[in-house]
Amino acid sequence: MIRRQFLKSSLGVTAAVAASSCGSQDRRVKLTIGADADPAVDILKDDFLPLFEKDTGIRAEWVEADYSGWLQKALNDGETKAGAFDIYVMDDLWVPQFAGSGYLANLDELGFQVDGDFVPSALDLGYWPPKIGLRQPGIDIRAKPVLYSLPLISDVQLLFYRRDIYTAGAPETWNDVLRMARQKSDPSKRRYGWVTRGVKGNPIMNSFFVLLHDFGGDVFGEHWKVVCNSPQAVEALEFYLSLLAYEPQGVAEFDSDQEGETLLQGNAFAATMWTGWCHQINDPAKSRVVGEIDFAVPPKKVNRVAKLGLFMAGIAASAPHKPEAMEFLRWVSRPDIQIRYARAGGMPYKLSAFKDEEARARFPYLGAALEALTVGVASPRISDWSKVEDILGTELNKALLEKGNAKQHLDAATAEATAFLKNAGYYAE
Amino acid sequence: MRNRLLYWALLAPTALFALAMTVLPLVYSLRASLQEFRLGRPPAFVGLQNFQALLHDSSFHSSLGTTLIYTIFATGIEFLLGLGLALLLKEEFPFLKVIRSSLIIPMVIAPIVVGIIWRLLYSADVGLLSFAVQALTGKSFSVLSDTALALPALILVDIWEWTPFMFLILLAGIQSLPQEPFEAARVDGASPWNIFVNLTLPMLRPVIAVAVLIRALDAFTVFDQVFVLTQGGPGTATEVATLMIYKTAFRFSQFGYGAAMAVAVLVLVACFSAAVTRAFKGSV
C-alpha cells in the first residue's frame, strides 16, 4: 500500500514537473524584434514591451538601428533566412519588397483573425499583392491579397500649425497657408511661415507627395505611365517653391529632424510632419511651443489627402519563434491594449482606441490623425518605389536649389523614371 | 613527408579562414554581378548585361567623376599639408609632444562622429560657420545646400581628419633618413631648398608612395562622411561611387547591378594601385 502510494505520488510529481517544465520552456524563449530607431516607437518599446513580457511571460528583446542600417540588417536576415529576428518592424513601403521576396510569414496561414476594428487604410498596407491600385509586373491580377504584416504605429502626416498665428483655426486651403506666410513671416526675427524637408530622395518626396496629390497630380497613371510632369504636378511644385521665400535659409539640407526643430523652437508657423512628432510638441524639455500647436489634415486644393507612413510589423519567414511572435501581434492588437496605448500617447491602429474619450481628451491630435488616416495615400506599392522616389527626389531638390524650373525638372524626372521602369520590365514591348 | 604534412596542417586553418573571409565574398559578388538580382524576383543569370548597362549609365559615370575629384584634391592637399607639418615638427622644441599628440586627435575619431561634428558646424540654421559668415557679412550662408560648395566642404572634412595620418607617416620617414648625405650637402654649401628637392624628396619616395597610395584608396571609397553630411546632395553634387553602390543595392534592392558597380570600382582601384606601384617601382 505504501509502495503503491509512493509510486502514484511519484508519477504525479514527475508529470507535474514535466508539464511545468514544458510550459516554462515555452515561456523561456526570447522574442527578437528588429526596428528602426525612431522616437515614434519609444512608447511601445519602453512601456508596452515590459507589459507584454509581464502579461505573457515571453521575454522580448528590441533590437534597433538607424533607418538604413536596419533595412540592411533586415534584408540580410530575410535573404539568408538566418532567423536572427522574429518580427521585422518595417516602413510600410518595405512591405512589397519583403512580402514579394518571401521574407515574411503568411499571417492568414498562421491563423491571425482580422476584425472590423482596424483602421481600414492602415490594415490594407499589410497585404501583398495590394488590395487596391496597380500591381507591378509579374504579379497576377487575379492573385488574392494575403496578409503579411499588421500596422504597429499609425504614422501619418498632419498639418502642424500655430494656433496663435492661425487664430481662426486650421487653414482650409494651401492659399491660406501662403497668405499667412506672406503676412506674418519675418526672416530677420527668424519667424517663418512654413518649413519643409528638402534633402534629396525620400525626405523631399515625403513633403511634396501631399502637395502633389492635393493639387490633383500623381506619380503614376494607367499602366505605370509616369505622370509626375502633368500640369497639376507642375502647379504643385511651383506652389511648393513659392513657399521658399517664407522658409529658413538652407531648407535644401533639412531632413525631418531640422524641420521638427524649427517648429519646436517656435520659428515656423506651420509644417506637414509625421504624427511621431505630436508627442514632442508638448514636451517642455524639447519644445518652446507647448500648447501652441494644433493639428489638422493637410489643407486642400483639388483633393484633401495625407501621406501614410506607417510602421508595420511582420513575422519573419525564418523566425525561430513564430507562435510567440504571433502572440505578440495578437496581444498588441487587443482593443484594451490599443486603448491603453492611445491613452499613453501612442498612435494606435484600432478605431476603438482612436475614439476613446479619455485618450482624445489627453491627446487631441488623435481626432486629426484618424481623419488623416481615412484620407491617407500611401507610397505606390511596388518594390521599385525607392528608386523612383530617389529619381524624383533628386530633381525636386535641384528645383529647390534653383528656386524655379519646375517643369524642366519634373520633365527630367519623368524621363529618367520612365527609362528605369522600362528597363525593369514595367512596360510591355 | 611528415614535416610537409604538418606544414600544411598548420597552415590550413589560417588559409581556410582567409579564403572564407576574403575570397568567398568576392566570388559571391562576382556571381551576383552577372545576375539580374532584385528583391521579389528570383535571381537570373544575365551574363555581362549589368556591365553593359554600366557603360551607358551616366549617373554612375558622374559619381566616378565626383569620386575622382574628391580623391585627387583630398589626397593632394593632405600630402602637401602633411609634408609641411612633418618638416616643421621634425626638430625638437618645447611642447613638441603636446603638439604632435593633439594633431592626431581627428584621426582617432570615428568617421561617422566626424560627419556629425561637421554637420553641426556646417548646418545652415544652427551651424557655427553660417553664424560666423552671417555675423561678418550680414548674409545667410548654407554650405551643404550649395552645389558649388558642398563637395569642397566634404573634402575639407577629409583633410581635417586625415592630414595627421600623412603627417605621421612622413614624419617617421623623414626621421629615419640617414643624416650623412644631408651633412655632406650642407658642407658643400647646398641651400635648404636644394637639399629638400634633391635629397629629402627623392629619399622619401618609398614613404610618399605608400602614404599616397593608402590615402588615395581610402578616399576613393569614402562613404561615412558623405552619408552623414549630404546623402549625395544637393542634387547629385556629392554623389560618390560608394554611396551610389550602397543605394543601388540596399535602397533600390538591385543587388546584381550594385554588385556590378562594386566590381567595376574594384577593378578601377586595382588598376590605380598597379599604376602607382609601377610609377614608384624600386621605391615601394
Image: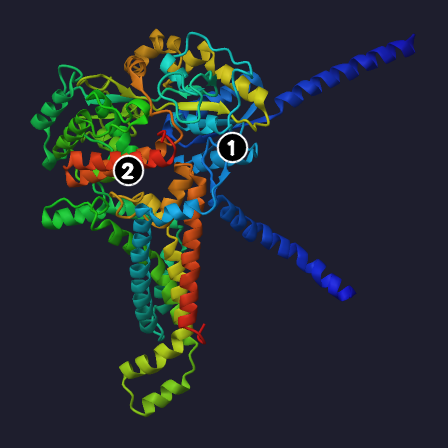
Residue at the (15%, 34%) spot, across then down:
A244
Residue at image mark 2: A416
Q: Nearer the viewer, residue B164 or A189?
A: B164
How many numbered circles are shown? Answer: 2
Q: Amino acid at mark 1?
A: Gly
> Mark 1 — residue?
A78
Q: Answer few, some or many: residues within 10 Å of disc 1's Cα (few below 14, many 20 plus, some between 14 and 19).
A: many
Residue B75, placed above or below residue A366: below
- Residue shown at 56% from the left, 17% from the top: A56
Percent x, y of residue A141: 42, 19
Q: Quadrant of the C terminus of chain A?
A: top left
* Left or right position of A232 against A346: left
Where residue B174 appears, as percent x and y from the top left, is: 39, 75
Q: Residue at x 50, y 11 (%)?
A: A113
Q: Secondary structure at mark 2?
A: helix
Q: Chain of mark 2?
A: A
Residue B40 x %, y %: 46, 30
From the image, state whether disc 2 or disc 1 is nearer to you: 2
